[in-house]
């Protein structure tokens, strides 16, 4: 026999001990008896504390203690024959582009996986849960996908798998094997984590090394170009030999394209300084916009919107959702075109928000499935998941009771028998109180 | 009469005399000393003849010797109407289930009635009831009145809190015997004795009308010595009075109860009434003899 909520059993034992203690140290009313001359008895409080030794009303004491134990046992939800192991796991394995060593990740997942556990593979989407030989086979030949991962997709699939395991095990543990890269985190991640009622264990694996390249930018612009100060303030300044980003404040040349093709992960940012140098980008009707956002970096300021970037993958957008910057792959790198007119006056380019925007616009090329709008920093994201785990565990009990109330077939019988004993206790107590006058 | 329950009692009190404590005033001829001077054989005194006296009562021999006309006076004898009043309150129906207090009151009432009836006095019964008109038998001297009294008492079920004092005010008998535990009226004072004031006032009014009041205070032995063990003592006539009686409070209870009994005895005797305490466990004939003894019941 196992108990689905054994802490109730401990509570019941404590309650029974409390009943016995209260019985031994009883504050009891003496038996009622008529006495015509009662008016001559000195007035005092009709309750007295006495230690009953040996205890009286043993049947009453036994009934009360037994009722406490039975009710506690009912709430502890005994299961005579467990349908599965006491603990099952849903192992969620990240196979996205963010994982540095897929073999190591597969080994970590294999170490967690046991018979009866389920394996969920995810990148930008999650696959069907795998079990047994299928799971081991998938781990043996874990395919790496060149797409960004989504922790939300993995957690959603894990919840479905957990619901299937719930009928086979007493409790289900979620094990997430991932580098927990910033690109894999979105607004739904923490909500999905909160929805998981049980324990979550995070197995951190090494991220892909090139996923966090130290960006250095070579700026080809006029000497008084305002972005020059921004690059310096953002610490992105590089030289011809070491820069892996190139920011051109005019139209890109053939040499720039060749430079992108010559390396891996190189990014060419084509950001014309004025409309005249990119006449074909001109908008039919110029207007103004209050802000731009790119990869979580937002700048709120009045911008004149006179241009529209060429077609491509949007990596930055205006406040109304229209693309402000687009990206097209080129070789093993990419070309990014930015249609943002910097104000001629003011200190906007010196503000930290502008520095963050510049880092986002000169960041690594976007991966398939990557959301370029909101990307929190990687360091904070890991901690926030664990904090959410602590918060969720405090709510787990209430959720567990609500979801699994009917799991123990013995519980209602025990509860009914406990209630019956309480009714019998009433009769026994009334009979014990009847004292002949 | 209920079976043979009272036969032994009546045998035991046969021949007992219950004289009036004071000479009786104007009343039909009977066995009690009267304040009237009559013509009986028991000489009392001589008195000078006055105009209007019956010449047949002149002592002619004394007239011959002294040449003066004297009347020979003798002590007259009178009847003494007796009314037995029995308290049928809930406190008298105790202890359950034997109802010893009530049984002792009933037997004492029958015994006293039999004694009074035996010496030719009219005897009656009054039992105030809580939820019914009082059970009243007017004083009679005829044969069988004791049986009627016994049957009437046997039919009474004591309970509730009947008021004795108003019932006393309507009594015209010359002797009133009260059988009560003095606990019928709820107490108004801390000592418990204040509750008996209305009854005592009514008795005082009767005494002022030249009546003789005899109180038989019925006390249960269990009231003097409550059974051992702690209990929540509850007044059967007032459940608001509910107090724990344990070993540590027993002595205080007994002291308070004894002081109250002494106070009652003193107060009733001071009011001019006879007082006798009867404890359950005593035989009714013994109580009867103690009540009728004028030296024992009057201070």
Image (cartoon, coloured by chain):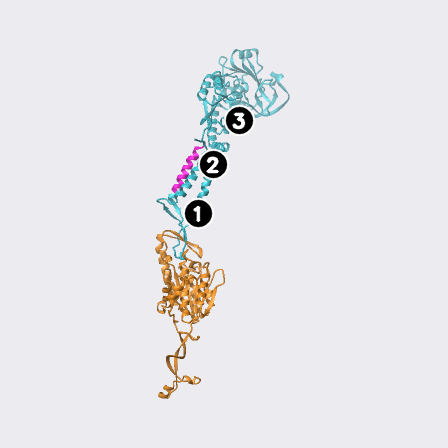
Q: Position of residue B196 (x, y in %)?
A: 42, 62
- In the rendered structure, the answer to whether residue B132 lies left or right of residue A279 reads left
Mark 3 in CB contact with mark 2 (< 8 angstroms): no
Quadrant of the image containing the N terminus of chain B: bottom left
The stretch of residues the image draws in magenta is A5-21
Which residue is the site of mark 3?
A: A188
Q: Is residue A401 above or below residue B223?
A: above
Establish whether labels 3 and 1 are both on one chain: yes
Q: Position of residue B168 (x, y in %)?
A: 45, 66
Supply the letter of whichever chain is cyan.
A
| Earlier-in-chain disc, 3 versus 2 | 3
Q: Is residue B80 above or below residue B68?
A: above
**How far apart are labels 3 and 1 at the CA level?**
60 Å
**How far apart are labels 3 and 2 at the CA level?**
42 Å
**How far apart are labels 1 and 2 at the CA level?**
26 Å
Residue B143 included in the magenta stretch of the image: no
| Earlier-in-chain disc, 3 versus 1 | 3
Q: Which mark is residue B245?
A: none
Supply the letter of whichever chain is orange.
B
Instruction: Pick the residue in front: B299 or B56.
Output: B56
Query: In which image quadrant can residue A72 be found?
Result: top left
- In the rendered structure, the answer to whether residue B57 lies left or right of residue A402 reads left
Q: Is residue A12 above or below residue A175?
A: below
Which residue is the site of mark 1?
A: A430
Establish whether labels 1 and 2 are both on one chain: yes
Q: Residue at x 45, y 42 (%)?
A: A422
- Label 1: few (<14), some or many (≥20) within 10 Å? few
Which chain is indicated by disc 2? Answer: A
Dot 2: what SS? helix
Which residue is the site of mark 2?
A: A413
Instruction: Pick the residue in front: B52 or A261.
Output: B52
């Amino acid at each position: 026999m196992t108990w689905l909520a054994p802490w109730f059993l401990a509570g019941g034992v404590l309650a029974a001990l409390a009943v016995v203690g209260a019985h031994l140290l009883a504050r009891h009313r003496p038996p009622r008896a008529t006495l015509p001359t009662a008016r001559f008895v000195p007035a005092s409080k009709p309750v007295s504390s006495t230690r009953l030794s040996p205890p009286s009303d043993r049947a009453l004491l036994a009934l009360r203690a037994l009722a406490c134990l039975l009710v506690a046992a009912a709430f502890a939800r005994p299961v005579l024959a467990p349908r599965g192991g006491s603990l099952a796991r849903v192992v969620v394995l990240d196979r996205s582009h963010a994982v540095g060593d897929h073999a190591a990740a597969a080994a970590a997942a294999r170490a967690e996986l046991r018979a009866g556990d389920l394996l969920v593979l995810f990148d930008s989407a999650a696959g069907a849960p795998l079990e047994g030989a299928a799971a081991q086979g998938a781990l043996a030949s874990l395919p790496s996908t060149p797409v960004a991962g989504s922790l939300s997709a993995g957690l959603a699939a894990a919840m479905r798998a957990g619901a299937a395991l719930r009928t086979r095990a007493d409790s289900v543990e979620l094990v997430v094997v991932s580098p927990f890269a910033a690109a894999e985190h979105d607004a739904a991640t923490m909500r999905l984590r909160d929805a998981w009622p049980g324990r979550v264990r995070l197995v951190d694996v090494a991220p892909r090394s090139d996923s966090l390249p130290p960006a250095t930018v070579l700026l080809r612009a006029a000497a008084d170009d305002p972005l020059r100060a921004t690059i310096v303030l953002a610490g992105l300044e590089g030289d011809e030999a070491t820069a892996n980003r190139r920011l051109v404040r005019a139209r890109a040349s053939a040499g720039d394209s060749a430079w992108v093709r010559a390396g891996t992960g190189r990014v060419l940012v084509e950001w014309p300084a004025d409309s005249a140098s990119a006449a074909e980008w001109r908008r039919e009707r110029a207007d103004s916009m209050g802000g731009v956002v790119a990869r979580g970096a937002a700048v709120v300021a009045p911008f004149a919107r006179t241009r529209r970037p060429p077609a491509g993958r949007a990596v930055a957008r205006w406040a109304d959702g229209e693309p402000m910057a687009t990206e097209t792959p080129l070789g093993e790198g990419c070309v990014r075109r930015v249609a943002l007119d910097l104000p001629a006056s003011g200190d906007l380019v010196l503000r930290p928000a502008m520095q963050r925007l510049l880092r986002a616009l000169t960041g690594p090329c976007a991966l398939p499935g990557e959301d370029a709008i909101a990307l929190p920093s990687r360091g904070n994201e890991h901690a926030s998941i664990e904090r959410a785990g602590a918060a969720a565990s405090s709510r787990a009990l209430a959720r567990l009771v609500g979801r699994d109330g009917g799991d123990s077939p013995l519980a209602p019988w025990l509860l009914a028998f406990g209630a019956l004993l309480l009714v019998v206790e009433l009769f026994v107590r009334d009979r014990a109180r009847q004292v002949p006058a | 009469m209920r079976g043979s329950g009272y036969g032994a009692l009546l045998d035991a009190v046969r021949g007992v005399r219950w004289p009036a404590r004071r000479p009786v005033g104007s009343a039909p001829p009977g066995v009690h000393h009267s304040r009237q001077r009559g013509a009986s054989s028991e000489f009392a005194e001589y008195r000078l003849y006055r105009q209007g006296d019956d010449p047949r009562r002149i002592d002619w021999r004394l007239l011959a010797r002294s040449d003066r006309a004297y009347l020979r006076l003798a002590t007259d004898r009178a009847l003494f109407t007796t009314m037995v009043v029995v308290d049928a309150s809930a406190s008298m129906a105790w202890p359950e289930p034997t109802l010893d207090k009530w049984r002792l009151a009933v037997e004492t009432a029958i015994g006293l009635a039999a004694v009074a009836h035996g010496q030719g006095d009219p005897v009656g019964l009054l039992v105030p009831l809580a939820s019914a008109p009082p059970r009243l038998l007017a004083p009679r001297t005829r044969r069988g009145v004791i049986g009627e009294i016994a049957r009437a008492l046997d039919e009474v079920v004591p309970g509730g809190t009947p008021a004795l004092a108003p019932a006393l005010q309507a009594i015209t008998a010359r002797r009133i015997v009260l059988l009560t535990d003095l606990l019928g009226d709820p107490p108004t004072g801390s000592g418990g004795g204040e509750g008996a004031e209305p009854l005592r006032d009514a008795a005082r009014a009767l005494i002022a009308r030249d009546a003789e009041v005899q109180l038989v205070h019925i006390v249960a032995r269990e009231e003097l010595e409550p059974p051992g063990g702690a209990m929540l003592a509850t007044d059967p006539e007032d459940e608001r009075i509910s107090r724990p009686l344990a070993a540590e409070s027993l002595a205080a209870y007994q002291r308070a109860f004894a002081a109250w009994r002494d106070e009652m005895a003193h107060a009733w005797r001071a009011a001019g009434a006879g007082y006798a305490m009867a404890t359950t466990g005593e035989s009714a004939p013994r109580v009867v003899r103690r009540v009728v003894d004028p030296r024992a019941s009057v201070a």
